[in-house]
Image (tube, rainbow, N blue to C red):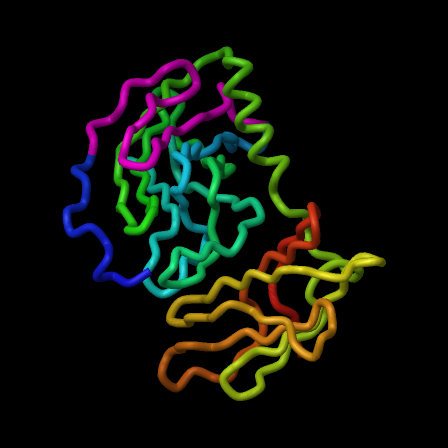
Amino acid sequence: MQLARLLLALPLLAAASPAAGAASAWHETAGGAVRLVTAPEPGEDGRLRGALEIRLEPGWKTYWRDPGGTGIPPQVTPTPGSAAGAVTIGFPPPAYVDDGYSVWPGYEESVALPLTIDIVRADAPVEATVFLGICQTICIPVQARLSVERQAASDPRHAMVIDTAFARLPQPASATFGVTRTRREGDRLIVETALPDGSADAALFVAGRQGYLLGRPEAIDGRPGRFAVPVLDEPAGAPAETAGFRYTLVNGRAAVDGRLAEP
């Protein structure tokens, strides 16, 4: 999706939405709405589980962790002085979205992204600025400051949102289901995978690192699980690296996460 088609007017940063139980209020926008949901208390590791819930209207989409060359990946930035420290975002398996202009990894239905939140203050709400893109024929940048009050009890409906978000995460890759080998071949990466017995089809999603732009992986040689990943851009003078890029490999209803293997 080209930058020229992004809306020029970024929606104004919303004031911190009032908390409603263990969830913020919904921030409404064209094409959908977003809110934060959190557990009432951190776990034994001192970290709080939560979710960024993205409600999409029919025909609207949002992005995966790597949105391509011009998209907007979901971002959650803690507000200084709030209970939240570092926030880690998880991503359920995406699908390839064709918007008529380009093809990119994302979600075409409402989705909840699981969050793991470091807690740095016990006497403050969990508050963060959320920034993401919601797209139809154009992409609308959505920015809002959302706040969740800390509580001793949780609404079971909010707990279900969080549990479902984490349950949808891909499993860690293994020797029998995941990338087994990668190599650089000119302007593309050749990626070989292991798939469960009986697999005839799979989809691979690879996220570029800083300065790298990767294209859509394509199956090659008619062999299930063997892909060519175009390297569309990379830092000047960078070595021809093949390992370390994060990936999600999807096979039917199953999915795994990992990093591209060394040759």
Residue shown at 64%/58% (left/top)?
Answer: 249
Q: Position of residue 172 (x, y in %)?
A: 68, 51
From the image, which quarter does the N terminus lie in? bottom left
Tell me if residue 116 can be seen.
Answer: no
Q: Magenta stretch mostly in which secondary structure?
A: strand
Question: Can you give x and y, in whole percent of width and height, for residue 86 in the image?
Answer: 41, 42
Which residues are drawn in magenta? Answer: 14-43
Q: Is residue 125 left or right of residue 208?
A: left
Decide if residue 175 is on the left or right side of residue 26. Answer: right
Q: Nearer the viewer, residue 97 or 115?
A: 97
Location of residue 259 (image quadrant): bottom right
In reply to whether residue 61 is colored magenta, the answer given is: no
Along the line of sight, which residue is nearer the eye, 45 or 98?
Answer: 98
**Which of the pair 100/261 is nearer the observer?**
100
Q: Quadrant of residue 185?
A: bottom right
Q: Would you say 85 lies left or right of 161 here? A: left
Above or below: residue 150 compared with residue 140: above
The residue positioned 36% from the left and 41% from the top of the image is 76
Where residue 152 appears, as percent x and y from the top left, is 48, 12
The residue located at (59%, 28%) in the rendering is 163
Reply above or below: 116 against 230.
above
Quadrant occupied by the C terminus: bottom right
Identify the residue at horizontal 43%, vertical 82% (top origin). 238
Q: Is residue 41 magenta?
A: yes
